[in-house]
Amino acid sequence: MAIYKRIILKLSGEALGNGGACFDAARVDAAADVIARLAEKGVEPGVVIGGGNIWRGRFTEAMNPVNADQMGMLATIINALCVEDALIRRGCRARVFTAQQMDRFARLYTAREADETLASGGVALLAGGSGNPFFTTDTAASLRAAELKADAVFKGTTVDGVYDADPRTNPGAKLIRDITYQRAIE
Ligand code: UDP
């Protein structure tokens, strides 16, 4: 019996690649295995995937941030199509929903249809972020969790918690085990 019925799983785009290549088939398969197992256990997984394995940030400050973010959102859709394929190969009913109109590739996200997919035992891959620039897929995951009344949000990423600095660039960064929203803001 699963503890949570409906979850949003946020996977960072880097979970699908290996640093050198955008995609590593073994890592895509590993991510799909986890998602398929959740669905088999009766969990309703809504999956938000980032795009950092394909595109992140901007070339330089001269680049329009809106174009850069649109490229990032498209990267999340490429990732979702990749994971959809891996899930379908496992016999899992998976469907990509995008925040942007993308008729021939996927369905335009509506909370109602994503809810129906999840409630009927399918996996909803929630791609394209929130559809707006200046946000990240973490925000999109929280937004979709609220819309779809998820019981919990899980984040699979390369950093194992909240730090007081970026642990990848600052070896002295300290792990903060518990933190409130208010303390993080302060
Ligand atoms: N993005 C955006 N709006 C959103 C979600 C994502 O503009 O609602 C863009 C943004 O440029 C972001 C990129 O898409 O950097 C990829 O998402 P994210 O950085 O969250 O991916 P991750 O680091 O988790 O792989």
Image (cartoon, rainbow, N blue to C red):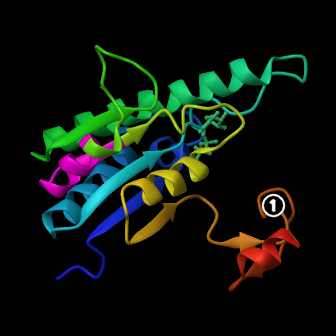
* Location of residue 76 in the rendering, given as x and y in whole percent from the top left corner: 49, 34
Q: Check the image and report above or below for 143 versus 41.
A: above
The residue at the point 44 percent across, 58 percent down is 145
Q: Residue furthest bottom?
A: 178
Pick the quarter of the image with the C terminus. Answer: bottom right
Q: Quadrant of residue 88?
A: top left
Report whether 94 appears left or right of 100: left
Residue closest to the eye, 35 or 168: 35
Number of labels in the image equals 1
Report whether 142 appears left or right of 91: right
Q: Quadrant of residue 70?
A: top right
Q: Check the image and report above or below for 178 versus 34.
A: below
Instruction: Determine if the magenta segment contains residue 123.
Output: yes
SS at mark 1? loop
Give the quadrant of ligand 1.
Answer: top right
Which residue bears the numbered disc 1?
166
Residue closest to the eye, 63 or 151: 151
Which segment is the magenta one?
Answer: 113-125
Instruction: Determine if the magenta segment contains residue 67.
Output: no
